[in-house]
Image (spheres, grey):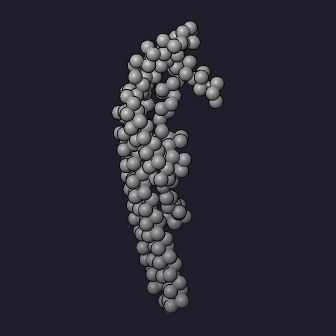
Amino acid sequence: MSSLLERASPLATPSGDPTSIRAAARDLRRVAAQGLACGGLDASAVAELALVWQGDAATRARADLAVLAARTRRVLPHLAYAADGLERYARALEHAVAQAEAVRRRAEAAVDEHARRVAILRSTATDPTTYAAALAHAARDRESALASAHRAHGAVLDELTAAAGQCARRLDALTAGASQRAVTAGTGRAIPAAGGTAGCAPDVRGAFIGDLGFVRERIEVAA
């Protein structure tokens, strides 16, 4: 039997920054509150724009504004839902980190205990047969403790993966609400780590403006 100590040490602690995740959730709630307070982008904005701006560019702008206004009104209800998902995941991540660290300490204690028993046996054993049997027993105890620790670690990661999937589905609702395109939540999506939601949240910006040529051009010019 291969040594579990060699095969899977150290037991990994889940990565991520709950503080950054909660900050992202607060941002979503703030945007939702501001959007609801002003009614989102009112449909009358398109008509008002037509009163002050004419020409080909204005026509394109009004068309994009109409789409953007509709998407904004659709997505606002999803913001608080997504924020709740992020907060739930932050709590799950904190719990998983604490559990994984406890499991790692348990595994390290098993290794230390094995080393202590071996040292005692080497210094006190007088009968080779008894010594060999005691060494084998100590090794079995160590392997059993490590196997238990790894099962517990796997359960921690499974629980966190389930929480990540739930968070991903809530974030996907933002993209779907913005674009009305069906989005399938992937089980392998990375969920917020040290950089907050960067690299893990659905591409809400792309869903909002990806097909709005005039808006994208203005953003590129401003950048």
Q: Residue at x 51, y 46 (%)?
A: 196
Q: How many marks?
A: 0
Towards the viewer: 11 or 29:
29
Q: Residue furthest front?
A: 52
Tell me residue 79's x, y (percent).
39, 37
Seen at 38% across and 56% down, the residue is 155
* Displayed quadrant of residue 69: top left
Position of the C terminus by quadrant: top right
Depth check, front residue: 52 or 45: 52
Front residue (pair 121, 208): 208
Eyeballing the image, is 185 above or below 58? below
- In the rendered image, residue 162, in percent from the top left (x then y), is placed at 38, 47
Residue 199 position, x and y percent, is 53, 40
Examine the rendering and report whether any part of residue 168 can be seen.
no
Question: Eyeballing the image, is 144 above or below 135?
Answer: above
Q: Position of residue 77 (x, y in %)?
A: 35, 33
- Relative to residue 74, is residue 218 drawn left or right? right
Near-viewer residue (9 or 119): 9
Q: Residue furthest top?
A: 55
Vertical relation: 3 (above or below) 182: below
The image quarter in which residue 81 lies: top left
